[in-house]
Amino acid sequence: MRVIAGRAGGIQLISPKTGVRPTMDRVKAAIFSSLGDVVIGARVLDLFAGTGALGIEALSRGAESALFVDEDRQSMAAIEKNLGKTNLPGRVRNADVFRFLKNASGDGGRFRLIFADPPYEKMESGERFTDKLLSNPTLPALIEPDGIFVLEKRPSEKIPPTNSWQLIRRKTYGSTEVLFLSGIRNPQSPI
């Protein structure tokens, strides 16, 4: 796993020994190819950050800032080491993603890009991470009007209807499906 392009292109990233499913390099390359110049100057939020690969790739390609959120301490340590290896700035927040989102309205500012690569298995409550993210009331308020929410999930996982998000693009890469979503300004056209 490496940074694909930009200032830190080619630098190998480290991964915690357990608990993460890093985005494959070819999937990451396809995501950023689809995003194009949207990345330049963007404020980025990387949820379920794991290794920090998506936020770090954005920083390497010209994003203004990145905030990494994950509750796993090994992941936080890996992100901090990866930021050091790439010499890229970023803020790291050790927190449960949904607790972070609940309190994020006071965190100030919106993000042009939000990445989420949640675990594929269900939560302890039996709820799917994807469902909980797409129905979260705070998340749409954190994205800029023309921002993009990039969500990774299993291809077989159906997404629930929502009045908060509009599907822009959907791409499948083996065992990963990537959704590109925008906030809905017209609540009559849900996913």
Image (cartoon, grey):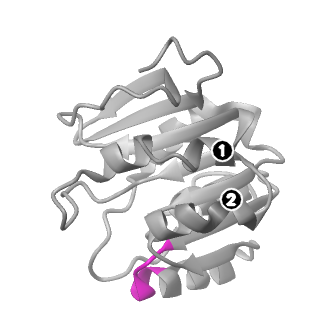
Q: Which residue is mark 2?
A: 105
Is 188 left, or right, of 67 in this rendering?
Answer: left
Amino acid identity at mark 2: Ser
Amino acid identity at mark 1: Ala
Element under disc 1: helix
Mark number displayed over residue 141 = 1
Q: Are marks 2 and 1 in contact (CB under 8 Å)?
A: yes
- In the image, residue 118 sits, relative to residue 41, either above or below, namely below
Q: Earlier in the sequence, mark 2 or mark 1?
A: 2
- In the image, residue 62 sits, relative to residue 17, either above or below, namely above
- Decide if residue 11 is in sight here: no
| Residue 165 position in % (x across, y down) | 51, 29
Q: Quadrant of residue 131?
A: top left
Element under disc 2: helix
Asked if residue 38 lies in the magenta stretch, the reply is no
Which range of residues does the magenta coloring cover?
Answer: 70-75
Quarter of the image that includes the N terminus: bottom left
**Residue at the outermost top position:** 188
Is 184 left, or right, of 75 in this rendering?
Answer: right
User: What residue do we see at 38% from left, 44% from top?
Assistant: 152
- Decide if residue 94 is in sight here: yes
